[in-house]
Amino acid sequence: VQLQASGGGLAQPGGSLRLDCAVSGHTYSRSAMAWFRQAPGKEREFVAAMYWSGDGTYYSNSAKGRFTVSRDSAKKAVYLEMNSLKPEDTAVYYCAADNAVHMATIRFRSTYKYWGQGTLVTVSS
């Protein structure tokens, strides 16, 4: 599986951005697609995830209610719609994937074998 993230950029506080992750290679119904982020000087952290089947979406506390993860199986793409952005959302965002992921481990960075290259999101006025 290869992943290509795009869509980052500069947004004002309260603004919106959509990140795209193009997926190539085999995916399965229990493949999990996730977004992580890493701010300068901090650990990479979980943001959101979903199964390729469309069953179940998972969010970090900071993302819940503001971000939405979705996928387009025909286009083989995963999206992260980010609204009500805050300066603390500034980070490099990564898409990640792996197959046969159990729900109990879907939020763990170590779960994912495949990673995209990252796209920078800067939230600033």
Image (spheres, rainbow, N blue to C red):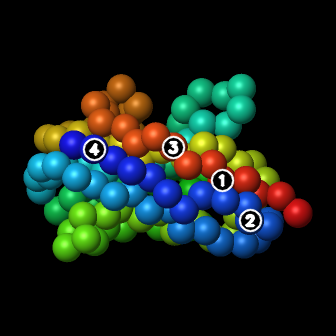
Q: Answer few, some or many: residues within 10 Å of disc 1's Cα (few below 14, many 20 plus, some between 14 and 19).
A: many
Measured Cα–Cα span from mark 4 to mark 1? 21 Å
C-alpha gap between disc 2 and disc 4: 27 Å
Residue at 67% in and 37% down: 39
Q: Label 1 belongs to which residue?
A: 121
Residue, disc 4: 2
Q: In this rendering, would 107 be left or right of 121?
A: left
Q: CA distance from mark 3 to mark 2?
A: 17 Å
Looking at the image, which residue is at 51% across and 43% down? 118
In the picture of the structure, the residue carrying the numbered disc 2 is 11
The residue type indicated by label 2 comes to Ala
Instruction: Label 4, secondary structure: give it.
Output: strand
- The amino acid type found where label 1 is placed reads Val
Q: Are marks 2 and 1 in contact (CB under 8 Å)?
A: yes
In the rendered image, residue 73, in percent from the top left (x then y), is placed at 21, 69
Residue 64 in sight in this render: no
Circle 3 crowding by C-alpha within 10 Å: few under 14, some 14–19, many from 20: many
For disc 3, the marked residue is: 118
